[in-house]
Amino acid sequence: MHTATIIDTKAPAFQAMLEDMRQFMKTEVYPLEPNFHTKHWDEMLPLLEEKRTMVKERGWWCPQVPKEWGGMGLSLEAFGQVSEILGSSPFGHFIFNCQAPDAGNMEILIEFGTPAQQEQYLKPLLEGKIRSCFSMTEPHFAGSNPVQMGTVATKKDGYYHISGRKWFTTGADGAAFAIVMCLTDPDHDNKYTRASQIIVPTDTPGFEFVRNISIMGEEGSGWASHAELEYKDCTVPVENLLGGEGAGFSIAQTRLGPGRIHHCMRWIGICERAFDMLCQRAVDRELSPGKPLALKQTIQNWIAEQRADIDAARLLILRAARKIDEEGTYAARAEISIIKFFTARVLTQTLDRAIQVYGAMGTTDDTILSWWYRHERGARIYDGADEVHKSSLAKQILKKYGL
């Protein structure tokens, strides 16, 4: 799926670009964060669009997209290092137009979209003129089992009639279209070919926005939200089908491999920012005059352990990215499972320890830590729960021993 030239990420020019991006994030993006808790997404857009224009001027737009489609054409390994930098702020990926779920939908449309679909949906998405969403998870079925769902698309007279309920559809609030995973042949003997992916404009009759789901007490809005949707005989032409009937599962798997690299490197960015905050707070906060927290052995142990874990997670992710670049997603499925559960654990522990060092202040919205703690607890659940990835990995390992 990820078509790009392999890049020497150790080259001075690439490293210089990364440093420029770090400085851009610190000077232009971090100062926007206090608005995150007080303003609706629509109120934030003018500020974000200003920064997006600056990114375009610097040639950093859509770093994950091939050059022929207007992006930087970075390999997955190279983009992973960019994603870490952008992940240090909730706004980073959106400002560079490589945010989930749009980044995954761009890849799907580039790989599987027809010329007409690419003209109508992909081009404005690449230009940042619209947003999209990916509608797969359902309330009554386990999200970690994408072959099991109840939303059905019935074909009749050149149209698909879609009926069902979805939730945790990230960014549906304000999106121009959804890519919907639904059953087109629910009785097929092969469960992996029962589902298809269909493009549904959100202004289609029968597309019903139910609510933005409250995540630990916060609904969010716009791109930073997770919606529940109802499809009530939502009717679109058969030309909106992506990649052929029955290809839904295979497209989803192709999408999710690189997507987990994106997520995991974003989490490393969060870890680095939280780790920096932890260390600075440990030095600045005195328990008594001249006795900062940093002198406590427990705090020193945490600092040492998190440094080792973050570094280990980064290396595992970049190894997985390199393998996908060189051999494809299927060949790297073990590595993908490893980084998914390992990095999620490192993320949640880093945030927890940073908050602990900040004390009561860490639980408030005076820092970015509490927002991340609320919203990134889901890292151990979405894109396959930890337990699912561990089981999958163990089975792959045990095959070598004849099980």
Image (spheres, helix red, strand yellow):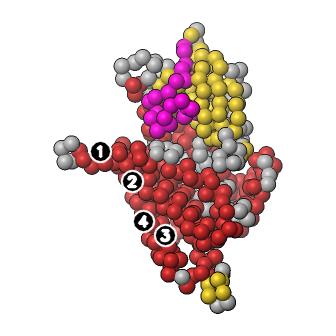
Q: Mark 2 or mark 1: which comes first in sequence?
A: 2
Assess whether mark 3 and mark 4 are in contact (beta carbons under 8 angstroms): no
Q: Mark 4 or mark 2: which comes first in sequence?
A: 4
- In the rendered image, which quarter contains the C terminus? top left
Q: Main secondary structure of the magenta part?
A: loop
Amino acid bearing label 4: Ala
Most foreground residue, 50 or 225:
225
Which residue shows up at 57% across the image and 39% down it?
105
Assess whether mark 1 and mark 2 are in contact (beta carbons under 8 angstroms): no
Assess whether mark 2 and mark 4 are in contact (beta carbons under 8 angstroms): no
Q: Is residue 147 magenta?
A: yes
Most foreground residue, 25 or 352:
352
Which residue shows up at 53% across the image and 51% down it?
379
Q: Relative to 8, does residue 220 appear above or below in the rendering?
A: above
**Residue bearing the label numbered 3:** 306
Amino acid bearing label 1: Lys
**Residue bearing the label numbered 2:** 338
| Residue 335 percent location from the top left of the image | 37, 52
Q: Relative to 381, does residue 25 appear above or below in the rendering?
A: below
Amino acid bearing label 3: Gln
| Residue 357 percent location from the top left of the image | 60, 72
Report the disc number at residue 395. 1
Q: Mark 4 or mark 1: which comes first in sequence?
A: 4
Amino acid bearing label 2: Ile
Report the disc number at residue 171. none
Most foreground residue, 227 or 354:
354
| Residue 167 percent location from the top left of the image | 60, 34
Report the disc number at residue 312. 4
Provide the residue span drawn in magenta: 135-155
